Image (tube, rainbow, N blue to C red):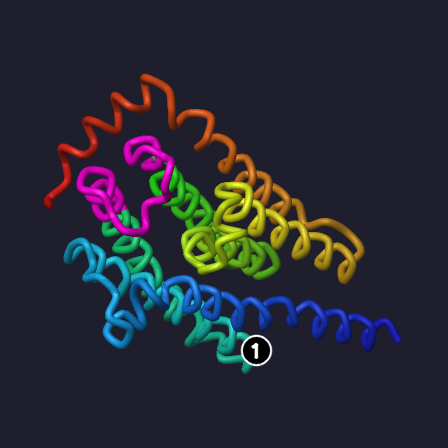
Amino acid sequence: MAVAEAALTRIREKRIYLIAAILFPLVVLIGFGRTYYFKPFIGAPPLSSYLVHIHGAIMTAWVTLFVAQVFLVRTKNIRIHQRLGMFSIALASLAVISGFFTAIAAAKNGAASSPPGIPRLSFLTVPLVDLVTFSVLFAAAIYYRKKAANHKRIMLVLAISLLPPAIARIPIESLQALGPLYFFGLPTLLCLVALFYDRLQNGKFNRVMVYAILFLIASYPLRIMIWGTETWLAVANWLITLSPV
């Protein structure tokens, strides 16, 4: 009986990762469809620079890799999953580098995706802190790569952490008008749903998952708190001098 119950728990637990593997690329596709993926078909304005093309291609590869990794685990192709995990380190490094230069170029020159009403230099805190949270969470996932229970939960939180840019671009004006409350609030809600679903299935909270979620959620108000300070604006003014375009 205990063995059967444990197997049932594992099956239920896997559902959330399957849902993530479906929703993650779907949200990205909907959010970036008009401004990136379907741009040639709808006559949208051209991208602001070649950096956006590079970063978009790298992040598309990252989303594809996440989906592939979930299905490799589900089909018990663990060795391939592990080999691709090593490739993900290189891809993550490229994502951070390209993301940094894309962000500072947008702060310097402006971009169609920049939210109205928020100065470009102030908003630069959002993508740069995104890169920090991505780097920390991915480093934690690598650290726990031999502890599957922790590793997979961190990767789930990491996937959720990448959603705000796509969510902010979903063309629903009433939601977009909410600004950070919307594009940070929805990922926060998703994190809490995932956490309590995990608690329900396993009978206890996974501490590493709790810490990862708290870290991510704490990063949201931090960006808003510092983006108008003189110190940040001075840093931002220096950062945009590093932009290659």
Q: In which quarter of the image is residue 122?
A: top left
Q: Residue furthest bottom?
A: 75
Q: Is residue 15 magenta?
A: no
Q: Mark 1 belongs to which amino acid?
A: Arg
Q: Which residue lies furthest to the right in this view?
A: 1
Element at label 1: helix
Q: Residue at x 30, y 60 (%)?
A: 91
Residue 19 screen position, x and y as percent:
59, 70
Residue closest to the eye, 80 or 138? 138
Q: Residues within 10 Å of mark 1 (few under 14, many from 20)?
A: some
Residue closest to the eye, 89 or 125? 125
Residue 34 screen position, x and y as percent:
34, 66
Residue closest to the eye, 23 or 21? 23
| Vertical placement of residue 210 versus 16, above or below | above
Which residue position holds label 1? Answer: 74
> How many numbered dots are placed on residues in this image?
1
Q: Which residue is drawn at 25% across and 48% down?
A: 111
Q: Is residue 110 magenta?
A: yes
The answer to whether 80 appears left or right of 240 in the picture is: right
Residue 202 screen position, x and y as percent:
76, 59
**What is the magenta range?**
100-124
